[in-house]
Image (cartoon, coloured by chain):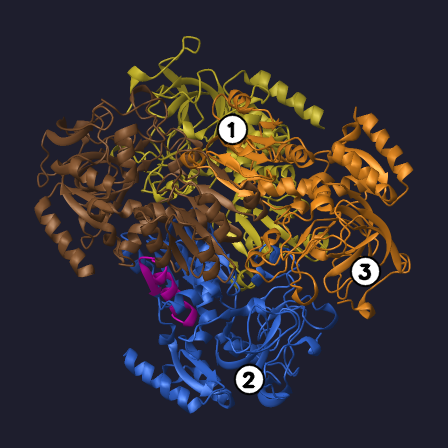
Chain colours: A yellow, B blue, C brown, D orange
Amino acid sequence: MSHPAKVKTDAAYPLPEHMRAWVLGDPGQLGLVDKPIPMPGRAEVLVHIDAVAICATDLEIIHHGAPAMIGGGEPFNKMFTPGHEYMGTVAALGPGVDEYRIGQRVSVEVHAGCGQCKRCREGMYTACLNYGLNYGDVDKGHRANGFTTDGGFAEYAVNNINTLIAIPDSMSDAEATLVVTAGTAMYGLTELGGLVAGEGVAVLGPGPIGLLGVAVAKALGASPVVLTGTRDTVEAVRHITAGKGLDYVLECSGAPGAVNQAARMLNRGGRICLAAFPHQPVSIDVAYIVRNNIYLYGIRGEGKSAAHRAEALMSQKRFDATKIHTHTFGLHELPTALRYAREHIDDAIKVVVTTRNAELARAVAAEITASNN
Amino acid sequence: MSHPAKVKTDAAYPLPEHMRAWVLGDPGQLGLVDKPIPMPGRAEVLVHIDAVAICATDLEIIHHGAPAMIGGGEPFNKMFTPGHEYMGTVAALGPGVDEYRIGQRVSVEVHAGCGQCKRCREGMYTACLNYGLNYGDVDKGHRANGFTTDGGFAEYAVNNINTLIAIPDSMSDAEATLVVTAGTAMYGLTELGGLVAGEGVAVLGPGPIGLLGVAVAKALGASPVVLTGTRDTVEAVRHITAGKGLDYVLECSGAPGAVNQAARMLNRGGRICLAAFPHQPVSIDVAYIVRNNIYLYGIRGEGKSAAHRAEALMSQKRFDATKIHTHTFGLHELPTALRYAREHIDDAIKVVVTTRNAELARAVAAEITASNN
Amino acid sequence: MSHPAKVKTDAAYPLPEHMRAWVLGDPGQLGLVDKPIPMPGRAEVLVHIDAVAICATDLEIIHHGAPAMIGGGEPFNKMFTPGHEYMGTVAALGPGVDEYRIGQRVSVEVHAGCGQCKRCREGMYTACLNYGLNYGDVDKGHRANGFTTDGGFAEYAVNNINTLIAIPDSMSDAEATLVVTAGTAMYGLTELGGLVAGEGVAVLGPGPIGLLGVAVAKALGASPVVLTGTRDTVEAVRHITAGKGLDYVLECSGAPGAVNQAARMLNRGGRICLAAFPHQPVSIDVAYIVRNNIYLYGIRGEGKSAAHRAEALMSQKRFDATKIHTHTFGLHELPTALRYAREHIDDAIKVVVTTRNAELARAVAAEITASNN
Amino acid sequence: MSHPAKVKTDAAYPLPEHMRAWVLGDPGQLGLVDKPIPMPGRAEVLVHIDAVAICATDLEIIHHGAPAMIGGGEPFNKMFTPGHEYMGTVAALGPGVDEYRIGQRVSVEVHAGCGQCKRCREGMYTACLNYGLNYGDVDKGHRANGFTTDGGFAEYAVNNINTLIAIPDSMSDAEATLVVTAGTAMYGLTELGGLVAGEGVAVLGPGPIGLLGVAVAKALGASPVVLTGTRDTVEAVRHITAGKGLDYVLECSGAPGAVNQAARMLNRGGRICLAAFPHQPVSIDVAYIVRNNIYLYGIRGEGKSAAHRAEALMSQKRFDATKIHTHTFGLHELPTALRYAREHIDDAIKVVVTTRNAELARAVAAEITASNN
């Protein structure tokens, strides 16, 4: 569906014909190849990727395929490029696009819904009923960058404008890769009710989403905000709240006992957002949930434009997402970067890959880290 | 807290000093005793109970205590009168009450929230944080008829006006006892979104709440509405919906596999209301819930004035709740009535106890049943 | 943007190359011309129009242009075909469309949002920020049938699948043209809260939307439902409600005093949906609105898939929309039909134009009318 | 309704039998008198008032009566004490109250709903249908401090615990009097949707609610936040937003043209909260509102526990409400304080009256003001 004649480019941002991109071969095997630069269609832009962060889900896709991919499609040996937490610079505009301009820096959220299904019509585009239907004759327009369509471990990617978020010059590349992570946490709080000033929130699981969940909750005025690891911390929460329990839990651990623990941290009428999950079925005390009027919300990412709200708080310096950025590598070093992320080498939390001078980026990051400590 | 001087009575509705009431001795033991007529306080009325239906929860309270009672209180040997699905005639008004008049027929919902806690202030009075705090020095004003305060297996009961629903003369006593049951189903649909016309609903569990859940969903225009028993019916639902799944499940079975089955009946973004629960923790596929953006709502009864909405549909004859009313007994026959309900004798679904002439009531009910068939 | 190669047709539904269509010349001037059959693009179908009803807004567009058209475009002398309350039979499928099949009968709602703007992403597609941007280089994908894109006073029209609603064989052509009218009323009630069973609703203005507003409100269990004309009926409403006022007003009259009257019909916390408006600014008692915590919702049609919910109620025969259908004409008789609608000739309420045998359709309609009386 | 036997006092906070209180004689006439200390009932506490701010509504009540008082009651010559923006120290507890402790510092919001009416049961306690019914035989339990029950221009006042908000020692008396003002702004944003991070808000009217509206909107991450006076600033807003308009307007001016201006500042689908109103009906362009899908929300104060959320943001030092506190007087100087507020003497914005040493308080305030400049 490319309309090359109508794609708008700018001599100041010359486009090569090919780009370097990592593609997935057999499970766990990535190769760096030359690929043609893709062309944006209606309501799309081409983004030059400046930086991309590694998410635990990337590791899973590379080794096992996409977790919620439907239609039977596995991404192996299809020249598929993973990577979904990226940012960059608009390099070309699809026909009719005037919402963004060439040269503009943008962060990218994952999901563009089909726009036609029942859920998209309700505004629930991360629950698009046509998830994954984006190839060939059954292209319903759904896009999930790095899940069902090519993602960010490359020099360029095409993006639906629904996935773009303009960022200011004051936001670094690395920080901008974290907008979607913060956006997922923001979406969790959005579904939980959103107005959390003065209300108690527990965040389970001190990974990137959990850590930014704490940051977003605090930025919105929640109090107290409790971050817990995987040990049983119900007693601690009960103690902190003088036995009353909290109002909300953002569950980001995927630990087997997390739902039961979360329920017991809440007061009657409390709510749990499930932003992670254990891979096996787990034992849950449904009676406790019903007797205590608890609601649970399973989410799949950064819905309801929450990434825009997260970006606004980040632009306003309400919290410093870069505190979880620990390592920087060049695009050509992706396998090393993935290993750092997977094995938590050197206490890695968020590992960022950049297409800019990686040496320089690493030096800058080290400096920032030093000044944070 | 009685203010006898200000209680308003009417010579046309003379009050005796004592009444007949069933009280709970040891677990499972009920005795019929004489009790003083209680006096209504501020925002309360005295109701002469004309009919009361038996709910599975009554059986549980009589044998094991109230399921969600807090504060350590068990109801045994405290002259406690259970029974919560009742209706009757206003017999006296507490000080300042002008919302109802003596002689008016009313149905009664279970919960009157404290009005002061965070949940009550949000309108979530069935999740009142002061549930059960209604005795002596810690009376926070919460009332749950037949759970934490005296209920309907008696000739009279005091009720907060928040629990009353005016009913028309065209509604029979027996039908009026079912308002709160239909109200629970209506509340489940309310929390699920409420606007179900043209949307698909499955109801799990063909007990009274489930059967009225089907009736309410149909009255609101839901389509299709599927009622399932405890066998695995996921395939059937998938077939009926051409593989797409439904939008909502109202889970009223409490079966161990119900949550997993419910999730698999839904499309992405679907919702489950949990109006029942298994007594033991059960294995749940949390990953399926999260990947499919499913929300779960545990409810504790007939919140958000849903019983008023249910009564409106019943008054308008949108569905015939009396179809689930199978047996009628006199108040003095309560042990027999409970046995019919517990053991499903003679295919009993809903068993009603009346303080009116039970022989006559039974004859009328038989006639109605005959004409329904 | 036609992709003829990928459009799917069916020999059983042969397409001519040209169709008869009414087009707007100078204001007030319509001409019947031959036009090429338009071809459906991605997410679009071609509909053979079987029947189209006349709305007051059509009369306005024909004489003055579209009321909310932006971007400076007036529809005169541009071969523009008005008409937006239509139904028909799917005649061809755009590339990749499998949501509908050729030969399927459908009713059509007006708005397909752009899918990219902030409002569309929220699910508020009738408030699309790209309204009217659907021509040439600034085509953002928005469509408003008969307002900004060609409508239904013709033999064929292209429609985004978002605007289609499948209808059953049991629904007549004429009834199906009223789905969008009922959908507008349903949307008004949706924005007002939706759960109106047992709550009081006043409908101001006994035109088609008002009359179907009464029908929808009753179908949802509202009580009382009061329909008023333009005379001051505040006292009557206060009397009916024993001085308490109603909960909701659906204002469909556009009368100068309607907002003030509506406010005074309500209790504190009541809500007004504005589905019509006076053409000149009017005097409004804002103090009354603020002191009484009244909310007002200005709506632009049939948003949030309300037309689907209306269709569901109509399919289930919850109300008989055909009672407001008074006259039927053939497509070639459109000017006469418009005159009947405009001048309320012969007490015309809803005038329908059909591409089928108009003589026959009139005879059938007369028969139905007779049997209704 | 006093229950002296059960009221809990503390020797560390000895209660005199009488207090000094200002009472309203004829319109505009206040007198300082001795009144008995009132005793708290169920769910009430006695608050020793430490500071009270003057609101424009106080001036209106003193001169014209309460704006939304119903039931015919005017407050003149009834020993009525006005004043509603106050804070203080809990001095005695009503029977059963354990939510607060004697000696605890609290801020006070205005409204305690009856808890029984339809609106209170929905959580909309500022729209209580029993507003003003709080005297004698028709006491429905509603309280509006300083509007329908005695308020804060005195040494003590009884308050329903629903109106109390615990404050930390780090919050000054003067700042605490502004919690309810900030709470009204927070409530406006709550009704407008609440999640305003990254969305544009205009605030009309630079009075105390407007100024704190700006502060709250910024604290929640809104951007841009525009404050306007009474001149036509539609063009400026259109310019700032590159022609797109804003998402929300908080109207606090009550200016005759404010609603029309607000509407024109918005994009399609935007929303207006009316927190002020002109005293005379004004001309409004309803057509513009309907065509642009604009919603209007008339509010009556600080509903849905918004004052708690505002207090949380203030405790966290997210904004400095004391910037609008300009003058401090002693309780005995109330007439002078009212004159400063009414005539904006010395650029007075918020004038606070204290029962503590007023000389000292003024000195402290002057110091703070100096350091702010």
Q: Earlier in the sequence, mark 3 or mark 1?
A: 3
| Quadrant of the snapshot with the N terminus of chain B | bottom right
Tag of residue D38: 3
Tag of residue B5: none
Marks 2 and 1, how far apart at CA: 63 Å
In this view, the residue in front, C280 or A280, is C280
Q: Is residue B279 above or below residue D33?
A: below
Front disc: 2 or 1: 2
Q: Position of residue A65 (x, y in %)?
A: 40, 39
Mark 3 Cα shell of 10 Å, populated few (<14), some (14-19), many (≥20):
some
Q: Chain of mark 1?
A: D
Write down the residue under mark 1: D265
Q: Is residue D287 magenta?
A: no
Query: Looking at the picture, which amino acid does disc 2 mark?
Result: Ala
Q: Are marks 3 and 2 on the same chain?
A: no
Marks 3 and 1, how far apart at CA: 49 Å
Front disc: 3 or 2: 2
In this view, the residue in front, A40 or A343, is A40
In the rendered image, is residue A140 in sight? yes
**Circle 2/circle 1 CB separation < 8 Å:** no
Toward the top, the furthest residue is A11
Number of numbered discs visible in the structure rendering: 3
| Quadrant of the snapshot with the C terminus of chain B | bottom left
Write down the residue under mark 2: B12
Q: Is residue B221 magenta?
A: yes
Q: Position of residue B71 (x, y in %)?
A: 68, 69
Query: Looking at the picture, which amino acid does disc 1 mark?
Result: Met
In this view, the residue in front, B353 or B291, is B353
Q: Residue at x 72, y 57 (%)?
A: D161
Could you tell me which secondary element the residue under label 3 belongs to? loop
